[in-house]
Image: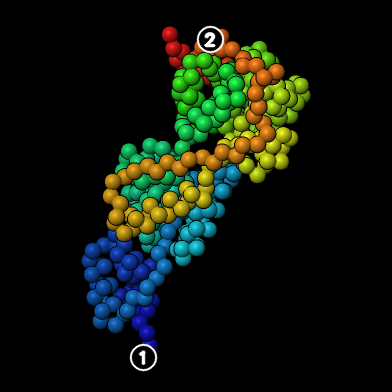
């Protein structure tokens, strides 16, 4: 006797195989009356459902960066899902609607836009876990995030332990939400140590850092935190041109790209996200949601990995550099003289942090 398949049911009811598949998978996208007819026909035709692999979808932003963060996290999610025998789909914001015909059991989102994640939650009506979207758990969506606050605090403490008192953060003006979070956490880390003075050096992507080294000398900065991937070599080249040697004259901590930073001269102390653990925690969380053992939306924080190398040392001559202003962050804009300034953005002394009285 020929085995009854989904196509057999679809042909009998003059429906698409995708609609029948969704109904048999209890998808909410199928109308109740249509589902009833499909289930009734399946019983009459002797259809027996076979145990199938769960299908998960990974949602990506249309502005998927293809940098170290995006590719490393995506690779870990794909690898660990395959090892658990999940079927996977990849989709970007622009083609989410075209994939609704596929019944998915759960979703991972690497999208940065809050509205996009809300739309995913409404459209698919299945468990959703977001990565590095720090506020979505407040809106009923589960999330797994890297502990930015802990990493910035640990970097500042490492500088402090080596005797540095005047510390700068190199921060992009036009680089996303996480950049603003790092600025905020840098201020808090400086505030915890009354003997520290912090400097916020702002730049636009594409800036050649022509004003960076003069500012470092003028401000007597002895430690520089670089929380943006891809600028390591660029920065080292400018420091070398200005005869500022790492770590003899200035200590440097880099962010992400641990494979590149270990081959620089000197190898850079680096804080990087723990992608294997992020992927593992995200999959475990989604599995709990599928089993209905998780109900209250929560945010799981994953500590950064700290790779201590040769770019952090005590200040020049082993002396602690005294803090003159005491416990405040000064903001300085590094201008790119080759480009006109963007309208609506103040160029000088655009203080992001209020100084304490």
- Residue 40 in view, yes or no: yes
Q: Who's the residue at 67% across and 31% down the image? A: 311
Which quadrant is home to the N terminus?
Answer: bottom left
Residue 18, given in percent of the width and then of the height, sits at: 38, 67
Describe the element under mark 2 as helix, strand or loop. Answer: loop
Q: How crowded is mark 2: few (under 14 residues within 10 Å), some or many (20 or more)?
A: some
Circle number at residue 325: 2
The picture quadrant where one finds residue 340 is top right
Quick check: 257 above or below 209? below
Q: Who's the residue at 53% across and 53% down the image? A: 76
Give the residue pinned by disc 1: 1
Residue 181, given in percent of the width and then of the height, sits at: 47, 30
In front: 7, or 350?
350
Describe the element under mark 1 as helix, strand or loop. Answer: loop
Q: Who's the residue at 56% across and 48% down the image? A: 72
Q: Who's the residue at 68% across and 41% down the image? A: 262
Residue 4, given in percent of the width and then of the height, sits at: 35, 82
How far is mark 2 from mark 1, CA to CA?
Answer: 87 Å
The picture quadrant where one finds residue 31 is bottom left
Which quadrant is home to the C terminus?
Answer: top left
Query: Looking at the image, is mark 2 or mark 1 earlier in the sequence?
Result: 1
- Residue 174 in view, yes or no: no
Quick check: 117 above or below 323? below
Circle number at residue 337: none
């Amino acid at each position: 006797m020929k085995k009854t398949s989904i196509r057999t049911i679809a042909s009998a009811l003059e429906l698409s195989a995708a609609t029948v598949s969704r109904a048999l998978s209890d998808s909410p996208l199928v109308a109740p009356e249509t589902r009833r007819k499909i289930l009734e026909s399946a019983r009459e035709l002797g259809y027996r459902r076979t145990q199938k692999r769960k299908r998960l979808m990974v949602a990506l932003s249309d502005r998927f960066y293809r940098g170290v963060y995006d590719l490393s996290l995506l690779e870990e999610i794909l690898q660990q899902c395959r090892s658990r025998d999940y079927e996977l789909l990849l989709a970007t914001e622009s083609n989410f609607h075209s994939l609704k015909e596929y019944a998915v059991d759960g979703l991972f989102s690497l999208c940065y836009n809050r509205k996009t994640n809300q739309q995913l939650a409404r459209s698919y009506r299945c468990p959703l876990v977001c990565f590095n979207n720090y506020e979505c758990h407040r809106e009923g969506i589960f999330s797994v995030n890297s502990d930015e606050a802990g990493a910035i605090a640990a970097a500042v403490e490492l500088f402090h332990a080596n005797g540095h008192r005047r510390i700068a953060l190199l921060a992009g003006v036009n680089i996303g939400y996480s950049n603003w979070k790092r600025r905020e956490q840098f201020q808090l880390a400086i505030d915890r140590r009354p003997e520290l003075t912090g400097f916020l050096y702002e730049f636009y992507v594409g800036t050649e850092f022509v004003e960076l080294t003069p500012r470092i000398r003028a401000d007597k900065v002895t430690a520089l935190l670089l929380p943006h991937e891809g600028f390591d070599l660029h920065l080292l080249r400018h420091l070398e041109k200005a005869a500022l040697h790492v770590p003899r004259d200035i200590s440097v901590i880099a962010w992400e790209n641990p494979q590149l930073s270990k081959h620089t001269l000197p190898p850079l102390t680096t804080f990087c996200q723990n992608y294997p653990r992020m992927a593992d925690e995200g999959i475990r969380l989604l599995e709990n949601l599928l089993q209905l053992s998780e109900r209250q939306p929560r945010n799981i924080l994953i500590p950064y990995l700290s790779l201590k190398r040769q770019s952090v040392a005590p200040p020049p001559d082993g002396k602690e550099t005294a803090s003159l202003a005491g416990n405040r962050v000064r903001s300085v804009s590094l201008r790119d003289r080759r480009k006109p300034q963007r309208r609506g953005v103040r160029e000088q002394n655009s203080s992001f942090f209020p100084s304490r009285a």
